[in-house]
Image (tube, rainbow, N blue to C red):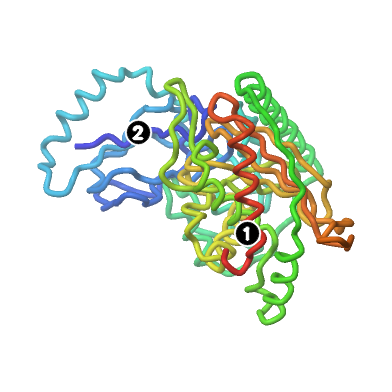
Amino acid sequence: MAVFAMPSLGADMEAGTLIEWIIKPGDTVKRGDVVAVVETQKGAIEVECFEEGTVETLDAELGATLAVGAPLATIRAPGEDPAVSATAAAALETRLGPEAVTQASAQPAEMPPRMASAQTSTVPEPPPAVQRSDQAPPASPAARALAEERGIDLAILTGTGPGGAVLLGDVEAAEPAPIIQAPPTASAKAGRKMAAMRTAIANAMARSKREIPHYYLTQTIDLQAASDWLAATNAKRAPDTRFLMGALFVKASALAAAQIAQMNGHYDAEGFHPAKAVHAGVAVALRGGGLVAPALHDADTLPLDTLMGQMRDLVARARSGRLRSSEMTDGTITISAMGDTGADAMAAVIYPPQVAIVGFGAPVSRPWITGDTITPRMTVTVTLSADHRVSDGRRGAKFLAALDAALQTPEAL
């Protein structure tokens, strides 16, 4: 009998609030299945299961605020005797004690809307969701986000979740309906929540700068070969299959991280742990403010077409609040790009427990010496921020050289 516990969804997470169950007793689950939605300092995150078997019991109620490590559910392994569950539950209570779970409310009347931030350290005050009806039912954050996107009035839906809560599947099966606009006070409350998010991000980044001895290396890279290849390749593609320069930045950075192990991994109380794979965190700016950096798994080995498709999916889900726990916790290095119209350069702050982040400025045309001539070339300024406890400038320079080399042969990415 295995206990599925509240996972840590970030270096600064101490507790989370259970706001939706996706499973029920008797369901069969496997590793990677989404089993619950938890509200954390990073917003509402879909939590994936780490066990395989049959759900024996749900050990936490909706609205409960639980410390990291507190029990969420009991899962019976395949072939295990169900009678073991009572003994396991008793042993669990003896080991953890009742203080592991603090009840916020047994059945909250209104679930908080999904928000996300990759760099937060406190839980912002959740505002009421946008009102669509005086009798809007409780709904999960994912359901609310999709309902707003599709123009569906939650009040017309019959929820299949606990206490009649509207779940994502209920919205997916519904027809669009008119939305009654929110009263003026809603935007003010949303603004207060965004201010709280910015404060939380500031706290997390202050901790990073205080505890991590950053060093910075900046290099301007000739981007003409990549720019020409991108233009020629996209000219033969449908608009929805074209590559963005950001995909080349992510792939080149991932390849460089695979070569220079000191840039790819985590640092904790026991020291540096190099990662066995490159899970590239991609910084995504949220509409209205805030930032998340969900991970693209095995980014160094993904074909560019696959990587571009996954980036589009990741950005869409990040902005609609439908990220998964593994995407929020598995990142081994982060890539942040200003886009086509941003600043020329950016020195980013490392997101712990990672040990490096790569900042790309906006690509610009500059005079460039090629042989004995000066010609205009598309260039980009790249800044590596790295942890001096793990690497030094020499290793950082090798990382930038590997990144540069990858961008000179875009057809091989």
User: Where residue 384 sits: x, y (%)?
Assistant: 67, 39
Q: Which residue is mark 1?
A: 153
Residue 60 as seen in the image, left or right of residue 204: left
User: Where residue 331 sits: x, y (%)?
Assistant: 52, 42
* Figure label count: 2
Which image quarter is the C terminus in?
bottom right
User: Where residue 145 sits: x, y (%)?
Assistant: 61, 53
Say whether residue 132 is visible. Answer: yes
Identify which amino acid the numbered label 2 is placed on: Ala
Disc 2 is placed on an element classified as: strand
Name the N-terminal-most of marks 1 and 2.
Answer: 2
Residue 308 as seen in the image, left or right of residue 50: right
Residue 7 as seen in the image, left or right of residue 152: left
- The residue most toward the bottom is 236
Which image quarter is the N terminus in?
top left
Identify which amino acid the numbered label 1 is placed on: Asp
Residue name at image x 60 percent, y 55 percent: 252
Q: Which residue is mark 2?
A: 5
Mark 2 burial class by Cα count in 10 Å: few <14, some 14-19, many 20+: some
